Image: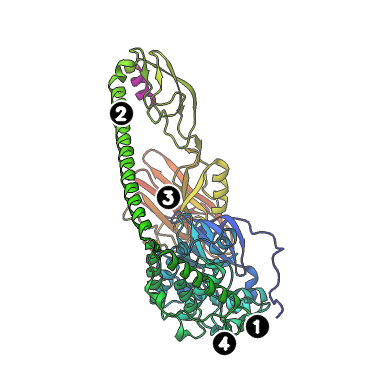
Amino acid sequence: MNDGVRDDSNLPPMSLGILSERYDLLDDFGTSPLFRHFRARDMQENTLVSVKLLRSIMREYPDVFDAVKVSALTHLSLRSDHIAQLLDVGEDPEHGLFVVEQFVRGVDLGDRIQRSALPMPITIINLLLPIVAALQEAHAQGAVHGGVRPDNIIIGLDGKAVLAGWACASGLHRLAQRTTSVELAIARYAAPETATIHSWTPSSDIYSFGVVLYEALTGELPFTGEDVVELATRHATSIPVAPSTINPAVPKVIDNLVLQCLMKSPSERIPSASALYQQLVQVGDALRAGRSYGGSDQATPVVASPGVPYGAMSPKSQSARFSDSWSDEMAKRRSTTVVDDDDDNDVDDGRYAKANATALKQRNASIWAMLAASFVLLGSIVGVVLLIRPYLMPAEIILVPALKGKTLTEAQALADERGFKVEIVDRKNNPDVPKDVIYQVREAEGQAVRPGSVIAIWVSDGPEMVPVPDLRGKTIGQAKRALEEAGFLLGGTTKKRDFAEAGSVIDQSVVGADSAPRGATIDIVLSAGDEVIPGDQPDPAVTTPTTPGSSDATSGQTTDLPPADSENPRWFRIPYSVPDDGAEHHIRVDVEEEDENRTVYEKKHKAGEKVKVEFEVKSMKRKIRLFDNDQLKGEVE
């Protein structure tokens, strides 16, 4: 099969930015057959996540696109402590379909197998037991993984493994119909029946796990082939070599378990992930305790070596059988007592042995007595030193107290109390230490110094305070760049209905020009425009009764402005519809209060536009007027 997917590896890398106004892309981890992988920060939850962005070339294959989307949405509700949790599925207007997954810092099992020597079998069982638990819990919830492979098993920094890639299997299998390399990668771990039914079951997950377990124990795959057909044929017909043949440290009970996972017929495999989990737990307990596991007493299946017909014994097996027989014979010889025919010699040997045992007991008693005397002498010396130590130390010596972490005031008080001085070597900003707190001391705690000695200290000036840029009116991308240039991080984002352009910043947690610690996070509020935000109240209705004395030259009507907000009587929302007369209109809103008159809004608008003015007044005694081309259109007190 020729690869039918156009190569897009020479495309320029995607610039990091904000995805779907929520995910701040921090690092580009590269490309897999389906996705571009990013480490990102969820700005709503303020957590690190893994973002998988479907490669843009996949838009040319709707079946792949749909398969990934459906699979991700299907597994979105899956819950387990042993999986990389799917968190979100969405489509960005610019970049397309993306899947958000729990971020796990670590390496995949494939890298671990390639880079490390073969670990002990008990280590492998402990490592992969959570993967079986993940399959057990997923199968119980009606989910099947369909792609259990080393690259989907992530080992975290704490050594715990989780199963990832829950949104990949269906899309990869459709992509494999066009790409030989993907098809070959899937076939290495696929159960024989999946080659014909093209679907996955809990039993096929168990088979794939058996291949992974085999590879982890031996460093090799149970079956290899030059192409997909050869590989699939071997999975369907060949008998794998027992793992212990490659790695002698693997006990027979694990051989049996692995081979049972790799049975050709689903009905002959271990029946469920729950049963597999129980067997692995029992085997692990037995290996840790150094005892045999009951399952090892069962007959071991006959395993053919490469090039040897099934049922025949390979030369290596014959050699192993001879070695076992030789070891058994030597053990019998070592356990047999040899008796001399000479009775006199027997008597002499018995007397000699008795005398030798008596001498050995006497020597052991002498050694124990000497050890006891040594411990008593050592304890006496330590006790005497502790008793006379205060008298040996000169009266003019003092010990340096713990100064690190204390405030400058506390350190000065200790210095005055104990008779030494403190000298500030340097003061500088430190983002991790509050202001006026000591973060470094030259002399070690407990060091002996003379009274009046100078103890050198370094004092923090606290985090560096820098002005926060004014973000109002900027897009989220512009706000992020402005904050990073000033030394800040973009924090959480929320939306609010506002007359400002949708997507622009209308508020921030620290007002522009105010100062904040360098490196602090600044939250922002974005305008949602006319979008209805849950919990917001709709704007008051606008009526247009005819009002004598304030006629509109165009329409002959005036606008009765809505009253103040019911919850905040100082807040007004004034909507206005510009007449659709083909002319430009100059809209102005004036506020007349006790101490001043001011214009809160003034802007030119095209005919037919919708205007919404929001503002806050200072006084409860006020009069608000709306003008269109300097003609009064309405007022409210």
Residue at image x 32%, y 32%?
374
Q: Which residue is mark 4?
A: 196
Residue at image x 41%, y 62%?
533
The Cα–Cα distance between marks 2 and 4, rounded to whole angstroms, is 82 Å
* Dot 1 amino acid type: Val
Q: Which residue is mark 1?
A: 229
Q: Is residue 65 visible?
A: no
* Dot 4 amino acid type: Thr
User: x, y (%) of residue 225?
Assistant: 65, 77
**Total numbered badges shown on the rendered structure:** 4
Q: Which residue is mark 2?
A: 377
The Cα–Cα distance between marks 1 and 2, rounded to whole angstroms, is 80 Å
Q: Which one is in front in this view, the residue at disc 2 or the one at disc 4? A: 2
User: Upstream in the sequence, badge 2 or badge 4?
Assistant: 4
Q: Which residue is mark 3?
A: 615
- In the image, residue 136 above or below residue 574: below
Residue at image x 45%, y 48%?
590
Q: Could you tell me if the residues under marks 3 and 1 are in contact, i.e. CB atoms within 8 Å?
A: no
Q: Dot 3, crowdedness within 10 Å: few (<14), some or many (≥20)?
A: few
User: Upstream in the sequence, badge 3 or badge 1?
Assistant: 1
